[in-house]
Amino acid sequence: MSSRTFALGSRRLTPGWATPSGQVAPVGWATTMGLQRFEQRLERLVEGAFSKALRGGIQPVEIARRLTREMDLLRRVGVRGLIAPNVFVVTLSPQDADRFQSFADVLARELGDAAREHARSEGYVFVGPVEVEIRSDPSTRAGRYRVTAEVREGLDGLAVASLILSDGSRIVLGSEPVEIGRLPECTIALSDPNVSRRHAEIRRHGSDVVVADLGSTNGTRVNGVSVRERVLEDGDEITVGTTAIRFETS
């Protein structure tokens, strides 16, 4: 696992992106926009606690910037493409850890999302689920922090695939199918009255992930199109009843 100790600052930006208007973006546009979205999401989620934590010292966006920097530094060529680290440990001083304590879980989740977003923008792939842990270390001075990163394969060597529910929770797909429906025993049990008892199933098929309708009353849609069975791609939106579920491969 790579480890570096540093103060605030330092980043690497990637050229060649186009802005939403179609113009050639300045160097680092995609990375900068991703970090701005990270900060805005975190601020909305934790509000008062976030404002208090930002009065001085380490800023969450600086940690996110370092995390994406580690991904760039440690990427490597693999069979599936450019493989980036997927397991990160952020080590803070006790003082800084106390500042973030009230929203440490939210911060870890948002840092994970920042890593996934950076991977999509740079064309990186993960060989296992993204994990972020925040630790406190008495030997670390206030205002300084470490980010360690490593590539760690998932169980059974399966390609990374996840379902993101409407509340933001993430279900990592393993080797077993995921069933969606109103029955309590379904993997994703929904109270949506427009969803059938056993509505749809998401399963692996070789290197692909497939969604299949299970004969539901109202059908299953992918990106607004009704399907019986379909291979999913990164970013696809699966709709059952009035419930939307996003599929991600990062």
Image (spheres, helix red, strand yellow):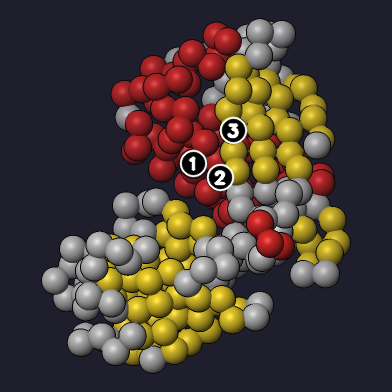
x then y, percent, for residue 123: 70, 64
Side of 1 relative to 179 (left or right): right
**Residue designated by label 3:** 133
Spatial CA span between label 3 and label 2: 10 Å
Residue 201: image location, x then y, percent:
40, 77
Q: Position of residue 189 (x, y in %)?
A: 28, 63
Residue projecting furthest to the right:
77
Q: Measured from the top left, where is residue 218 in percent x and y?
A: 21, 85
Question: Is 83 positioned to the left or the right of 25 in the image?
Answer: right
Residue neighbourhood size for the residue with mark 2, other residues' Cα within 10 Å, grouped as few (<14), some (14–19), many (≥20): many
| Residue 236 in view, yes or no | no
Along the polypeptide, which appears first: circle 3 or circle 2?
2
Which quadrant of the structure image shows residue 219? bottom left
Residue type, label 2 = Gly
Tell me the tag on residue 109: 1
* Residue at x 66%, y 14% (from the top left corner): 137
Q: Which label sits on residue 112? A: 2
The disc labelled 3 sits on which kind of residue? Glu
Q: Is residue 77 something that shows in the picture?
A: yes
Mark 3 → mark 1, Cα distance in angstroms: 9 Å
Q: Secondary structure at mark 3?
A: strand
Q: Residues within 10 Å of mark 3 (few under 14, many from 20)?
A: some
Asked whether the residues under the numbered discs 1 and 2 touch, taking CB atoms below 8 Å apart as contact, a structural biologist would say yes
